[in-house]
Amino acid sequence: MKLNIPKNIAEIIPYPPGKPMDELEREYGVTNSIKLASNENPWGPSPKAVQAISEVVQNLHRYPDGSSYYLTQAIAEYVQAQPGEIILGNGSNEVIEFLVKAFVRAGDEVITSHPSFLMYQKFVAVRDGKNIVIPLRDMEHDLEAITAAVTDTTRLIFLDNPNNPCATLISRQRFADFLKKLPESVIVVLDEAYIDFVDPEERIDINALIRNPDGIPAVLALRTFSKAYGLAGLRVGFGIMHPEIASLLHRVRQPFNINLPAQAGALAALQDQEHYNKTMDGTRQGRNWLSEEVRKLGCVPYPSHTNFFLIDVQCDATELYEAMLYKGVIVRSMKAYGYPKFIRITVGTAQENSRFVQALSDCL
Ligand SMILES: Cc1ncc(COP(=O)(O)O)c(C=O)c1O
C-alpha cells in the first residue's frame, strides 16, 4: 500500500476521549469504577427518553424523517425561535463540522482559544484551514487578543461559553463590546454546550442577536442533548442561527443525520422537566459539596458555571490522575492543556462524589 496522505490530515492529533470505564477495569483490574472525566450527566438519561426510544426501535427498518420535523418544532418552541432558525446535528460536534464545511476554504482562518474544546481546530485542519489559536487570559477568552487577530480571511470565531475546561463565562457586556469591534464578515459561534448550568440572568440573549444582525457580525449558538439532558450516547445537538445561515448548513448535511432513536429520545427528554430539574439541583449541590471537601484536603477548587470544574491539586496532575485510576476513579489531568497542577472533574452523583473525595484524599 502506498498512501498519498495530505499533510493537513497527517498532522491531525486524534481527539483524546476520557478513558472508558470498561477499559480501565480491564487494564487496572479494578471494579465499580466511576468516570468523572467527560462532563456527562451522572443521573443517566431521562426515563421518558428511554421509553420513547424503546417504542421506535420497531421501526428501525425505515429511514428516519430527514427533516426531524417534530424534534425541530419542539426545540424551536423551547428556545423561542422559528424552526427555520434551528439546525440539528449528530451531536453539536456535527454542527461545528457543518459550519467549517460551509464557510472555510483551504487557507481561510478560524480563531479559537487555547485551551478550549478541541474539535473546532480538528475540523478546520481537515478542511486545510488555518487555525489561529489565542491563549486564554486568566482562564477566560481573551476577547481583545481575538479581536486583534481578525484579518480579511477570518471566517469563524469559536467561543465555548462556558469554556471547557476552565468553566468560565463571558459576561453579556463584554460580549456586546466585543461584537461592536468585529467586521461583519466574520461569524461568531457561541458554543453553549453547558448553558443549562448557567444562571439565566447571565446568559447571552442569542435570539436577539441572530435576528438583529445589522451592524454586527453574524452570531449563532450551539446546544446539545449530551450534558443537561443525559443523552451523550444518542448524539443530538443543534444550532440556533439566522435562517440564511441555517439554509446553507442544510446544504452540507447528510439527509438522515439524526437517526430514528435520536429523534424520539431527544423529543421525550425535552419534555421531561422532572429529570432536568433533578440534574440541575444535583449538579448545584454536588458542585458546592465537592468544592468544600477538596478545600479541606488542601486543594483549590475554581469557580464554575457548569457541571465540571478545575481543581488545583498542588502536585503533578498526571501522576495524581494515574494514582486515582488504581482506585477506579477517572478524572482528567490538565497537564496537556497547560495546567500541570490541575485536574478537571465532572460533578457526579452524591455517591460518586464521596468516592472521588476518598480517592483524592488517599492519593494525595
Ligand atoms: C464545549 C463543548 N462543545 C461541544 C461538545 C460536544 O457536544 P456533543 O456531544 O453535542 O457533540 C462538548 C463535549 O464535551 C463540549 O465540551
Image (cartoon, rainbow, N blue to C red):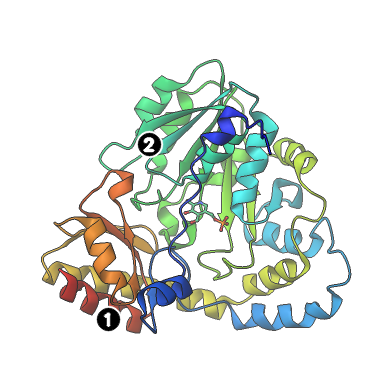
Q: Are marks 2 and 1 in contact (CB under 8 Å)?
A: no
| Type of amino acid at the residue the image marks with label 2 | Arg
Query: Compared with residue 273, is residue 5 higher up or lower down, i.e. above or below?
Result: above
Near-viewer residue (258 or 1) = 1
Question: Looking at the figure, which quarter contains the C terminus?
Answer: bottom left
Name the residue: 71% across, 46% down. 85
Q: CA distance from mark 2 to mark 1?
A: 37 Å
Quarter-wise, where is residue 226 in the image?
A: bottom right
| Type of amino acid at the residue the image marks with label 1 | Ser
Q: Position of residue 147 (x, y in %)?
A: 42, 24
Secondary structure category for the residue under label 1: helix
Residue 184, visible in the rendered structure: yes
User: Is 25 on the left-hand or right-hand side of 62?
Assistant: left
Viewer-side label of 2, 1: 1
Query: Compared with residue 180, is residue 362 higher up or lower down, i.e. above or below?
Result: below
Furthest residue toward front: 1
Q: Which residue is mark 2?
A: 174
Near-viewer residue (9 or 218) = 9
Q: Position of residue 335 (x, y in %)?
A: 28, 49
Q: Earlier in the sequence, mark 2 or mark 1?
A: 2
Q: Which residue is mark 1?
A: 354
Query: Compared with residue 3, is residue 345 higher up or lower down, i.e. above or below?
Result: below
Name the residue: 17% across, 76% down. 362
